[in-house]
Image (spheres, rainbow, N blue to C red):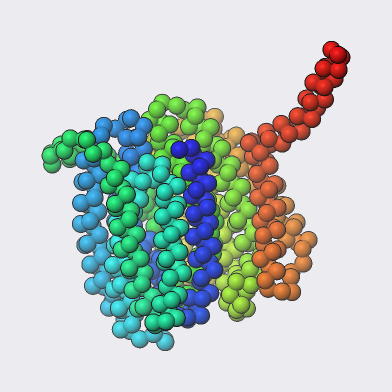
Amino acid sequence: MGLRRNILASYISQGYVTLISIVMLPLYLQYLGAEAYGLVGFFAMLQAWFMMLDLGLSPTLSRETARYRGGALAAPDFRALTRFLELLFLAIALVGGAVLFLGAGFIAAHWLNTSGLAPHEIERSLQIIAVIIAMRWMAGLYRSVTAGSEQLVWLAVVGSVIATIRFVGVLLVLDQISATPTAFFSYQLMVAALELAILAHHARRQLPRDAAQRGLMATLATVKPLVKFSLALAFTSSVWVFVTQTDKLILSKLLPLAEYGYFSLAVLVAGGVMVVSGPVGGALMPRLARLEAEGNPSGLLAVYRSATQLVVVVATSTAATLFLVAEPLLYAWTGDRALAAQAAPTLGLYALGNGLLAVSAFPYYLQYAKGDLRLHMVGNVLFVVLLIPSIIWAASTHGTLGAGVVWLAMNAIYLLCWAPLVHRRFERTLNLPWFLRDILSIAVPTAIAGILVAWWIPGPADRWLVFGKAALVFGTMALLGAALTTTGWNRIRHAMARPALDRDLHKEEGSRA
């Protein structure tokens, strides 16, 4: 199955999931209220912190699945590795979920700042959340097997169906049964169980059935060479959680739960940048690992650069649109002017930061394919020492706006200062053309075009026309960006040269006649 087909399927699925979650969110606010929605944002933050227990095993399994498909890993070894990780994940899910479950009372009483929700309602919701997080995290293991097999079309279809059940179906519960956090999260628990069962069944079907069974010692011998790479991934994942979630953790303590709900809303919308660029990374990583296993460095670099250009187009168009029309877009979406005014600056800053993050992830993809994350670990240590205290100070003293400024600055520093070092380590001649041709030559004209269109079109009086303005700004940037990519520019030149070629052929045929 081709890389383009996988990326397209992932884009359609992620776009649908994002759209349906955005459309449903104002209805959740209407049924639950801002304070109860703050619990939803707190749930997302807890789930991210729980991922620290992954220990780098999910991406390692995805990479080993790709290597197995590429012929670099024997079937018995792959089957033994998968079975071992399945048991390990189950044990960690049980222990981690139990800790969250038992700590629900403390969080409800001593961490969250509430005024309208009863403590027992919050505690019960947090206990349900603990079980959901354990199930979804377990499902990530099985998703890694399917993603490593590059069956992203199947994942896209299943993900879209589950998202429909999760986001739309819960409205029936809120409307007909009970508009409480407990009812909301109880329904999400049932959906999480369904998702886990489907992913586990499909992943197990991907295992080689004719492979010989391995004993415990043989299995450990298979796992041992991967420990170093897994620990490197685990370290990077842990640092990633600290960098991206510390502001949210601090603000969940400092802000009233209702205000935290508004902050979560802004971050969710800004996360649309990562949603539209994420499918490329999900499809790219196993493909790069496979090309590396096949000994095809030129093919690896070609895919790497073309994928960079694609992400630059998507990330620039999405991030700039959210920044340029943040406040009117939030008002058109929610109908709440106070909410829009409060959340718009945070939305704009986080959107721009996410745009930089989407591009700066590419050096990590390269190191992942090479199986060498040492430089990535060093870079993360340096950034943690500098940036985590900055985030803590900014969020504590300037709230959501300070956290947004640090988030934007952090990703700009990484892209400009650290990515060149990574490229120099693996391909000395890559960095300059990567920056100039694959990023700047696309991002700068695209962003300028978006600014001009947003400035030229006046703010619509009708709130629903705001979506039309946003679509026009995004469409202009996306079309220009696509034309500036290597593929787009070659197609334009081919289309322009074809009439002249046809005329020359016609003249030649005429002279012969």
Image position of 346 (left or right of 378): right
Q: In which quarter of the image is the N terminus?
A: top left
165 lies above or below 88: below
Q: Which residue is drawn at 53% across and 74% down?
A: 26
Q: Residue at x 70, y 53 (%)?
A: 476
- State the image quarter where residue 133 is shown: bottom left
Position of residue 474 measured from the top left corner of the image (x, y, whole percent): 66, 56
Image position of 329 (left or right of 238): right
41 lies above or below 277: below
Position of residue 415 measured from the top left corner of the image (x, y, whole percent): 53, 46
Position of residue 167 measured from the top left corner of the image (x, y, whole percent): 45, 68
Q: In which quarter of the image is the C terminus?
A: top right
Position of residue 100 measured from the top left corner of the image (x, y, whole percent): 27, 69
Can residue 436 be seen here? The reply is no
Q: Residue at x 35, y 78 (%)?
A: 182
Image position of 475 (left or right of 144): right
Can residue 73 be seen here? The reply is yes
Q: Which residue is drawn at 36% across and 69% down?
A: 188
Residue ranking furthest to the top: 512
Q: Viewer-proximal residue, 164 or 44? A: 164
- State the image quarter where residue 256 is shown: bottom left
Q: Viewer-proximal residue, 76 or 237? A: 76
